[in-house]
Amino acid sequence: MFVLSRRIGEAIRIGDIRVVVTRISGKQVRLGFKTPTGLRAYRAELYAAIEADNRAAQRVTPQLLDYWTKHDNATD
């Protein structure tokens, strides 16, 4: 893991991404990100949930999908 110290207003660059410390309050640090247009960024816990959903979707078989479309109570 890469660890460094920054003060409020100081920044680091990771490729085309600029990360700035905007506020420090107790044990919390607020960061600002200047990114290329269209770049998607997610909190780590949300990204983990998206990955889990994607893995679950890969396990769906055509037979299971057919069952769901025939027994979908949301459209009844």
Image (spheres, rainbow, N blue to C red):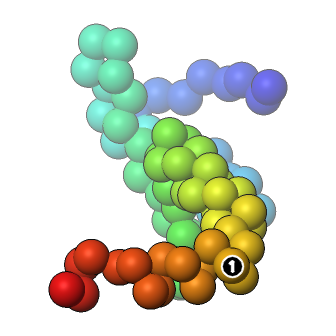
The reply, left or right, for residue 9 in relation to residue 62 is left
Q: Position of residue 71 (x, y in %)?
A: 39, 79
The residue shown at (68%, 69%) is 60
Q: As displayed, is residue 7 above or below residue 43? A: above
Q: Position of residue 72 (x, y in %)?
A: 35, 79
Quarter of the image that includes the C terminus: bottom left
Q: As displayed, is residue 75 above or below residue 22? A: below
The reply, left or right, for residue 61 in relation to residue 50 is right
Q: As displayed, is residue 29 above or below residue 35? A: above
Q: Position of residue 48 (x, y in %)?
A: 59, 45
Q: As displayed, is residue 10 above or below residue 5? A: below
Q: Can I make out residue 14 in this image?
A: yes
Element marked by disc 1: helix
Q: Position of residue 20 (x, y in %)?
A: 48, 47
Q: Which residue carries the number 1 mark?
A: 63
**What's the amino acid at mark 1?**
Gln
The residue shown at (58%, 85%) is 66
Q: Can I make out residue 10 in this image?
A: no
Between 51 and 40, the one nearer to me in the picture: 51
The residue shown at (44%, 86%) is 70
Quarter of the image that includes the N terminus: top right
Q: Farthest left residue?
A: 76
Between 48 and 5, the one nearer to me in the picture: 48
The reply, left or right, for residue 37 in relation to residue 13 is left
Residue 8, located in which quarter of the rendered image? top left
Structural crowding at the residue carrying mark 1, measured as other residues with C-alpha within 10 Å and reported as few (<14), some (14–19) or many (≥20):
few
Q: Farthest top residue?
A: 26
